[in-house]
Image (spheres, grey):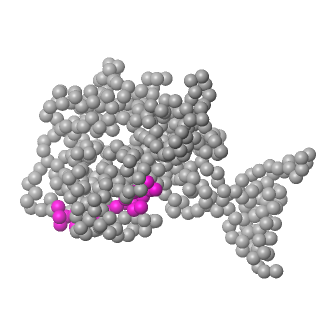
Amino acid sequence: MSAAPERSQELNELLEKVRRGELVPDTAEAEADRLGLGKLANTPDPSEFDPTQEAWWTLPMVIAWIACRSPEIVREYWDRYRSVCVEWHFCEWRERADGPVRGGHLLAQRRPATISSLYLAEKRNWENGSSAAEMTSIDDAKAQLWAALSQNEVQAAGIDTATNLRTPIPDHAWLDLATIEERGRDVLRFREPRGGLSSRGYDDVVFRRRNILAMWQPRRPEVCEGDVSSQIRPDKGTGYMPLYCAAHWIATKGCTLQIDPLDLGVWESPFSQLLSRISSGEVAVTGLRKGEREKIEGHIFAGISVEYPSADPDFGLLLSSELYLSSCIYVDDEHWRQGFNDSLQTRHGAKWSHLMVLKSDVLRHWPFSSREHENHTAPSVTKTGAPGRPSSMHLVEREYLARAARGDTNASIGEEAKVLFDWLQSAHPDAPPLTAKTIANRLRHEHRERMRKAQK
């Protein structure tokens, strides 16, 4: 008898003993190691599965993020990761219909994640006393997501059961959509006017990861618009810098001008200049692919579509197979490593992430730190009292709080931002301008919380 059949027989006998409850999994693992059978249960290296590099997240992944703000927790509800996790599961069984109930363990692949699995994990955490105080409940996380979707603050796409085609889900549809499980998967179905759920709805619902992280950001200190103190500069040190920081250097003429990074109008020229130099090979660029940093050929950037920082999603671009540049505001190194970075994307996810350009190349083509710019100072702006953070946002926030105290705020943050935008222009015409989108982004979380509390 050859060695392979002997090993197979030893393995089958060992697994059967665990199934019958004659051995516990830990003992079986030790015996498998002694016999040279290798590890029975298998959990892959988490570093090889980074959900922040996925272009699209599923419904359980999004709710897990809103509740915990942890990439590690999101990974646990990522089906691609779960599909390679083989674990011991307790089960009960009978040898015959009238026989005694026996208990043992089986090796099985993790099932796809569902919202119900989130509720089960939450229940276990509460029972074990391991729930963190800052965590949001699954009910609240789901309610926040539905509210944002119905107000078109974030968007989702799904396979329409009527056409069998993937399509964006309109904001008004979320008022009538409910989640149910079908064949072990979460799906969306429309509520019937007289109760119950119809067969119409959406399957395989996904969300743009970048937009979810922008709406529900990692728990971190707030960074003010226009604050250049955190930016990496090409005239400080050698090596590489994030691609966004290079565009920021160009937009601010060497950090001498105050800009609103949420205003898309400030980015067109800087990115055009930068990408032109990259595509011609005059600025070297690198990126991470499969965990390894490598040089990216410049011609890839020639004529590439750009998703500017804080831009609303272009579903035509997101659903196509076209390679495009997705840029993200740089806050700090930790934030950058958690997934808020520049990347080359397709609808299948990031082909290269954490894009960086050579500092010396940037400084050579945009030498704003040279002598001719030494006397260039930033224009005067309204001061907030915080050093290095000139802005007029504090005026808007003060007016917003006054309107809230009077009960004058609009239910929609978009409408409220337009009112505050008009107020700033009228009441403070000399103050640094802000766009309505900037105001909406700053006040969105607080406004949503106020509206949620008002509805209770």
Q: Let me know if residue 345 is in the magenta part.
A: yes
Near-viewer residue (351 or 342):
351
Residue 213 shown left or right of residue 266 in the figure? right
Residue 162 shown left or right of residue 447 in the figure? right
When the figure is inspected, residue 255 is found, relative to residue 300, above or below; the finding is: above
Residue 12 percent across, percent down from the top left: 79, 66
Residue 324 percent across, percent down from the top left: 35, 56
The picture quadrant where one finds residue 87 is bottom right
Q: Residue furthest top?
A: 406
Residue 207 shown left or right of residue 130 in the figure? left
Q: Let me know if residue 205 is in the magenta part.
A: no
Residue 50 percent across, percent down from the top left: 49, 57
The magenta stretch is 343-366
Residue 133 appears anywhere in the view = no
- Residue at x-position 38% and y-position 25%: 411
Q: Residue furthest front?
A: 163
